[in-house]
């Protein structure tokens, strides 16, 4: 998954208006995926590295009961 303005996504390169927008985009994406029949009942784990680690922590904070665990790499 590319954050807005990063990777192949659209938007001004490396510009983040509000960090919470990234967290909310990720949360919406992961909840929509986990709602699909083939993923229901499967474990949900976060992995984050560098800025992704911050996103993972904030995703977990947003809805702790949604996630089964997290792996953060500094």
Image: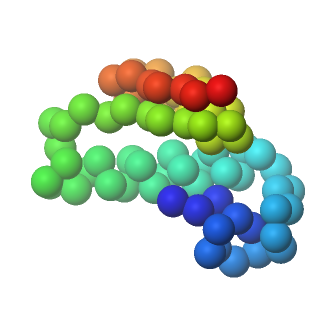
Residue drawn at point x = 32 percent, y = 34 percent:
44
Residue 32 in the image, given as x and y percentages of width and height: 36, 55
Left/right placement of residue 33 relative to residue 24 reads left
- Count the labels in the image: 0
Q: How is the image coloured?
A: rainbow
Residue 25 in the image, given as x and y percentages of width and height: 58, 55
Residue drawn at point x = 83 percent, y = 73 percent:
12
Can see residue 22? yes
Residue 62 in the image, given as x and y percentages of width and height: 57, 30
Residue 28 in the image, given as x and y percentages of width and height: 49, 52
**In the picture, which quadrant includes the C terminus?**
top right
Q: Is residue 72 above or below residue 11?
A: above
Can see residue 58? no
Nearer to me, 74 or 8: 74
Left/right placement of residue 51 relative to residue 18 reads left
The image quadrant of residue 40 is top left
């Amino acid at each position: 998954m590319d954050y807005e303005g990063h990777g192949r996504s659209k938007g001004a390169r490396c510009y983040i208006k509000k960090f919470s927008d990234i967290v909310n985009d990720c949360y919406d994406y992961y909840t929509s995926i986990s709602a699909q029949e083939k993923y229901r009942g499967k474990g949900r784990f976060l992995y984050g590295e560098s800025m992704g680690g911050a996103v993972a922590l904030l995703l977990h904070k947003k809805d702790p009961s949604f996630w089964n665990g997290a792996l953060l790499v500094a």
